[in-house]
Amino acid sequence: MRHLTSRAHAKVNLHLGVGDLREDGFHDLVTVFQSLSLADTVTLDIDDEERVASGSIVGALGVSGLDAASVPTDASNLAWRAVDKLVDHYRAHHGPVDAPRVNIRIHKGIPTAGGMAGGSADAAAALVAAHALLSESHPALPMTTLSELAAELGSDVPFTLRGGTMLGTGRGEQLTPMLSRGTYHWALVFFREGLSTPTVFHEIDELRGGGAVIGPSLHTGELARALMTGDPQQLAGTLANDLQVPAITLRRDIGRTLEAGRQAGALAAIVSGSGPTAAFLCSSELHARDVLDDLLADGRAYSGTTAYGPTRGAHLVD
Ligand code: ATP
């Protein structure tokens, strides 16, 4: 048995502007993603003795680490779907594929249903590992093809594949790299109970239908300028998330945690993506630790960690 391991990182949306609901059920987004040091790893255990000529090459999937119990271990897992998608692509474009049986092991450092693209990161990591395996015996695919396959797996998968700092448009899958100077430090607070992304998007539509004016925040110029300075103080004033009000409306505890983080001295407090994770921008790693310690000490937060960004996209590890 041999192994291939890859790692993919969580994201935070420095800007998340939610536009109109499209006919395909997605919303038009203008978002700025930044990848954080928080990561999951996906390992393929490869049995070269057993070859699979048709159907899924995945035999089984196991999950360990943060929130492991709430992650599916069947073919609905995004990492499993990613391997199947890649193999199907090779079968459709390169004739019969006789690949070895693989078992997937996921180790989670990213909270599940936390608004940090954990499942998407696993899909991206699995794509990279499966691509390394398949390209041993077939032509390697260009990044554009991998990104297209990633977009079919989920709106955030192309970003977790590529990492860094990117402007995302369309449903977030059309990416343009952005310049970002320096390193930004965060305290992240996780909640015991996750939030479903579709529920939060549904809530923004309900609130807007009832007359609430929430964005759409479509302009990222100030944020782009702040990112060029490398100064977290400047970045703090430019963060925006149209999903913050709907997330807090659904879960009042998020709003209380954001306020507690501001009281603890964070430069800015935002909901990460669709939540519930609360992300606190800080001036340094030490500052992030202090803010997190404050939040954890008085029992208002369930668990959390510090993280920094930007980091890289999904990549193989030794
Ligand atoms: P996003 O920020 O991209 O909107 P999220 O971080 O809020 O997503 P995920 O952690 O990606 O949410 O999980 C959403 C749901 O996807 C989970 O409730 C789970 O049922 C399902 N899922 C499928 N595969 C995975 C995976 N590998 N890891 C976590 N969840 C997964």
Image: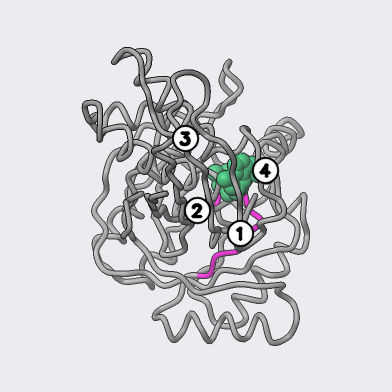
Mark 1 is surrounded, within 10 Å at the Cα level, by few (under 14), some (14 to 19) or many (20 or more) other residues, namely few
Residue 240: which disc? 2
Q: Looking at numbered disc 2 in the image, what kind of residue is underneath it?
A: Ala
Q: Is residue 290 visible?
A: yes
Q: What residue did someone put label 1 on?
A: 64
Residue 101: image tag: 3
Tell me which label, 3 or 2, sits earlier in the chain. Answer: 3
- Closer mark to the observer between disc 1 and disc 2: 1
Q: Which residues are magenta?
A: 273-280
Which quadrant of the figure has residue 138?
A: top left
Q: Which residue is mark 4?
A: 72
Q: Nearer the viewer, residue 187 or 66?
A: 66
Whether disc 1's CB lies below 8 Å from ligand 1 is answered: no
Disc 3 Cβ-to-ligand 1 distance below 8 Å: no
Majority secondary structure of the magenta segment?
loop
Between 300 and 59, the one nearer to me in the picture? 59
Label 2 near ligand 1 (CB < 8 Å): no
Q: Indicate the amino acid at tag 1.
A: Ser
Inspect this view and state whether residue 214 appears.
no
In the rendering, at what x and y percent does residue 122 appear?
49, 46
How far from the left and from the top, in percent, is residue 310? Answer: 34, 61
Is the residue 224 above or below the residue 47 in the image? below
- Spatial CA distance of label 1 from label 2 is 33 Å
Pick whichever of labels 3 and 1 is earlier in the sequence.
Answer: 1
The kind of residue tagged 3 is: Arg
